[in-house]
């Protein structure tokens, strides 16, 4: 059985007193009333479009808005005709794996710690994952080059390199510009497709924002994935994939779902158009308070039982447990305290046991974060062998 990806049934969610497991967003900043008004404005005009299947590209207005989002952040124009909307970026992840990993000896080269949704999807499709070691700056490009050389010498076929260069999940790392250049060079040298999963790019709190890989080179075979899950709401299930026509035309025949949800896309566009960045600023400000509350609570209560780095963006703190902590015991103690986090092995492409846990801070309230981390510290103390 594969590891828990973090996405649990809503019925289970209420079971945990402290849920730091899933990368959910902040319910307190969801604009219920304004969203209802947007629905009221837009639905009367949708009888035509809702009577059609959406097709492979999906709602044009939302694609234009997301192309503007990418332009505003990166300064590079994206043609909405090169974008398809998907049922969350997760659908795009499975679609590209289905498209580019059809050979018996296909594999995906990726950060050795990664989002479990992707790891589980690739594993389920029987695709081999080849891990690239990571450090505080993300995927190690020197290792990537030697891994690709070895794969080529073994006649194995990397379908693509899959990377999360900005606010990596789970580690929170940001790949510096120089290393991004190296990564592009390696992809170019091996003629390998580069898949950039950038769903956290706009969940930004402090520090520099390096450019996206697609904004740094136009001569690399590049597929870009992003989402509305982290800036708006995961329940909306809207993500997108951007690729130039030769690659996009390879992907499209493998899409068989008749297209993404027109209603969700139309109402979301109606709400976000004209205030996308104000909305993002508002949600990020609230998330930053939660991040800081979690960091403060860890510092106050957990002392030298663990270590971590403050993430400049994203929704997670990747916590290394002190060597004296019995990680299995900690899991049992947390479960008994109705406290949920995801253990490090859930993120390792081979399920290796690693002395880390990932804490998600987007969904719980500040007071739940403070009480929950105090509780976690108690669990750590009970699991301490010293
Ligand atoms: C790195 C990464 N990619 C993709 C996804 C999938 O997001 P969605 O399908 O909601 O767009 C997630 C969700 O947590 C993620 O962390």
Image (tube, rainbow, N blue to C red):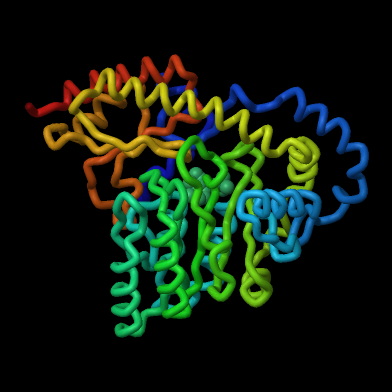
- Residue sitting nearer the eye, 223 or 42: 223
The quadrant of the picture occupied by the C terminus is: top left
Left or right of 242, for residue 36? right
218, above or below 266, in the image:
below
Q: Position of residue 162 (x, y in %)?
A: 45, 62
- Residue sitting nearer the eye, 49 or 232: 232
Query: What residue is drawn where x is 54% and y is 60%?
Result: 94
Residue 329: quadrant of the picture: top left
232, above or below 152, in the image:
above
Query: What residue is drawn where x is 82% and y is 27%?
Result: 37
Query: What residue is drawn where x is 38% and y is 17%?
Result: 370
Q: Position of residue 80 (x, y in %)?
A: 74, 60
Q: Position of residue 286 (x, y in %)?
A: 55, 25
Left or right of 385, for residue 313? right
Q: Is residue 350 visible?
A: yes
Query: What residue is drawn where x is 45% and y is 40%?
Result: 207
- Residue sitting nearer the eye, 15 or 205: 205
């Amino acid at each position: 059985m594969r590891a828990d990806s973090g996405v649990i049934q809503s019925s289970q969610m209420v079971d945990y007193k402290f849920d730091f497991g899933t990368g959910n967003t902040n319910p307190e900043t969801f604009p219920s009333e304004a969203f209802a008004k947007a629905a009221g404005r837009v639905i009367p005009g949708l009888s035509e479009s809702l009577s059609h299947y959406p097709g492979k590209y999906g709602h044009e207005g939302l694609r234009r808005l997301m192309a503007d989002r990418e332009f505003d952040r990166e300064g590079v124009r994206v043609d909405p005709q090169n974008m398809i909307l998907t049922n969350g970026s997760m659908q795009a992840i499975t679609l590209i794996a289905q498209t580019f990993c059809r050979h018996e000896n296909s594999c995906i080269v990726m950060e050795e710690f990664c989002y479990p949704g992707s790891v589980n999807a690739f594993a389920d499709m029987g695709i081999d994952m080849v891990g690239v070691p990571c450090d505080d700056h993300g995927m190690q490009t020197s290792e990537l080059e030697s891994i690709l050389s070895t794969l080529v010498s073994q006649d194995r076929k990397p379908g693509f390199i899959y990377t999360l260069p900005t606010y990596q999940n789970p580690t929170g790392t940001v790949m510096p510009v120089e290393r991004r250049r190296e990564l592009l060079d390696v992809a170019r040298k091996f003629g390998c497709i580069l898949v950039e999963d950038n769903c956290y790019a706009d969940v930004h709190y402090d520090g520099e924002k390096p450019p996206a890989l697609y904004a740094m080179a136009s001569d690399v075979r590049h597929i870009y994935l992003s989402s509305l899950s982290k800036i708006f709401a995961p329940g909306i299930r809207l993500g997108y994939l951007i690729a130039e026509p030769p690659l996009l035309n390879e992907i499209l025949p493998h899409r068989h779902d008749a297209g993404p949800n027109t209603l969700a896309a139309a109402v979301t566009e109606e709400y976000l158009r004209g205030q996308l960045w104000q909305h993002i600023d508002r949600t990020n400000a609230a998330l930053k308070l939660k991040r800081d509350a979690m960091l403060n609570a860890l510092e106050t209560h957990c002392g030298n039982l663990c270590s971590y780095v403050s993430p400049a963006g994203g929704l997670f703190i990747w916590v290394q447990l002190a060597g004296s902590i019995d990680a299995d015991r900690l899991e049992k103690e947390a479960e008994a305290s109705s406290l949920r986090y995801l253990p490090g092995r859930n993120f390792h492409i081979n399920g290796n046991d690693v002395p880390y846990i990932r804490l998600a801070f987007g969904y719980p309230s500040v007071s739940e974060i403070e009480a929950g981390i105090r509780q976690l510290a108690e669990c750590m103390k009970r699991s301490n062998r010293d």
